[in-house]
Image (cartoon, coloured by chain):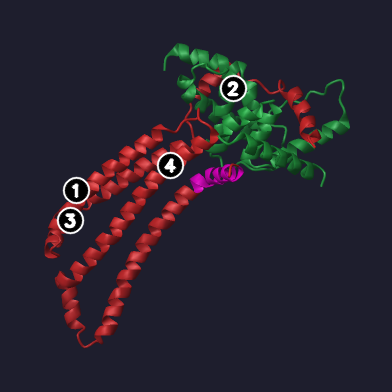
Chain colours: A green, B red
Amino acid sequence: MSNSLEQSFVKQLKENQNIIHKICRLYTSGEDAHNDLFQEITIQLWKAFPKFRGESKFSTWAYRVALNTAITLYRKSTRTVATTDMEGKKQFVAPEDYNFEEEEQIKLLYKAVQQLNDIEKALVFMYLEDKDYEEIAETLGISEVNARVKMNRIKGKLKKIVNP
Amino acid sequence: MTEELDLLKKAWKKDAHSYEQVTENQIYAMIHKRSSSIVKWILMISIAEFIIWSGIGFFTVDDNYLKTLEIYHIDKLFKIITGFNYAIVIVFIYLFYKNFKTISTNETVKKLMSSIIKTRKTVQYYIWYNLTMFAIIFIIVVISQITYDPNLNSVIENTKEMNPQTFWVIIGLIYFALFAVTFGLFWLFYRMIYGFLMRKLYKNYEELKKMDY
C-alpha cells in the first residue's frame, strides 16, 4: 500500500474516531476490551480502505465496517457483559447543569443497552446516531419494516429493564 | 414509549466528544498489527486442513503400503481413488478461494455473515467428503483384509474350533470400534475448533434471520 494512501487513511480515521469509540462503548465494557475492539476495527477499516471510493462519507462507511467487525468478525471470547465498568474510555466531566437523578437514569440505560444482543445493539447505535430506517435496514441487510418492528421491540425491552 | 431511548440519545450526543483521543501515531501502529478476526482464523485453519488431508495421502504411501495393497488386490483401485481425490481437492480449493474472496466488510451485516458461513461450509463439505472417503476405503480394506491377509487368515485357521458366529461377531465389533473411535475423534475435533470459532457468528446470524423472517 502506498504511503499517501496510508496518510490519507490515518488522517481521516483520526478525525472520525469518535464514531468508532461509540461503537466500542456499546459493544465492550472496560478499557482493555474497548482498546482491543478499537484496534481490530482499525485493522479492518484499513484492509477495506482501498475499496472505499468516497461515494459515501468516510464516517458512514467507517461505522458500517465497524459494526460488521463488532458483530461478525470480532473474536474476543473473554468479552463479558459485566455491568461494573460501563464508563469505557469516556472521561467524566461534570457539566454545569449536572442533574444527579437524570445521570443515574442514564447510567441505568447504558447498562440496559449492554444487556441487549449484538444485533439489537447495532439498531440502538444507529437510532442514537439519528440514522433513518432506510439506512438501518440497508446496513443490516434486512427489510425496513422489520427494522422498525425490531426497534419498537427493543424500546419495549429497554423500558422493562429500566422499570421492572 | 420512546422516552428512555431519547433520554439516552441526549446523553449520547453530550458524550460524543468525551472519548480519549487516539493519536495519528497510534493509528499507524495499529494498522501494522495483526488482525485476530474470525475470518483470519477460518482462512488459516482451512488452509491447514487442505494441507493435512492432502498430506495424509502423500506421506502414508511407502513400499510397505504398496505391497500390502497388492496383496489385498486393491492396488489398481487405489490408484484410481487417489487420482479422483486430487481432482476433488483442486475443485474444493477453487471453491474455497472463490467464496473467501467475496467476504467483504463493505457489505451489509447479513451479507458478510452469509459469505463467511458459505466459506466455512465449503471446508465443511470437504471434511465430510474426506470422512465419507475414509469410511468407504475402510470398508474396502476390511473386506480385502479378511479375504487376502495371510496373518489374519492364519488367525482364522487357529480359531477354527471357536463357534464361527461368535468369531465373526468379535471381528465385526473390533472393526466397528476402530471405525467409531477414529470417526468420533474427527467429529469432536471439528466441533471443538469451529464451535469455538463460530458460536457468536451463528448466534447473531440466527438473530438477524429471525428478525427478517
Residue A19: quarter of image? top right
Image spot of residue B61 (x, y percent): 19, 52
Residue denoted by label 4: B118
Q: Amino acid at mark 3?
A: Phe
1 or 3: tag closer to the N-terminus: 3
Does label 3 lie on the same chain as label 4?
Answer: yes
In the image, which disc is placed on residue A60? 2
Quarter of the figure with the N terminus of chain B = top right
Q: CA distance from mark 3 to mark 2?
A: 57 Å
Q: Subunit of mark 2?
A: A
Q: Position of residue B24 (x, y in %)?
A: 57, 16
Instruction: Look at 63% across and 39% down and name the residue there.
Output: A146
Of marks 1 and 4, the one in the foreground: 4
The picture places residue B141, in percent across and down from the top left corner, at 22, 64
- Give the magenta range: B196-211
* A59 or B33, nearer to the observer: A59
Helix, strand or loop at label 2? It is helix
Residue at image location 61% in from the left, 19% down from the top: A16
Q: Which of the chains bears the disc numbered 3?
A: B
At mark 3, the secondary structure is helix
Is there one chain holding both mark 2 and mark 4? no
| Residue B78 marker | 3
The CA span between labels 1 and 3 is: 9 Å
User: Does residue A71 lie above or below B16 as drawn?
Assistant: below
Q: Residue at the spot x=86%, y=20% of the render?
A: A96
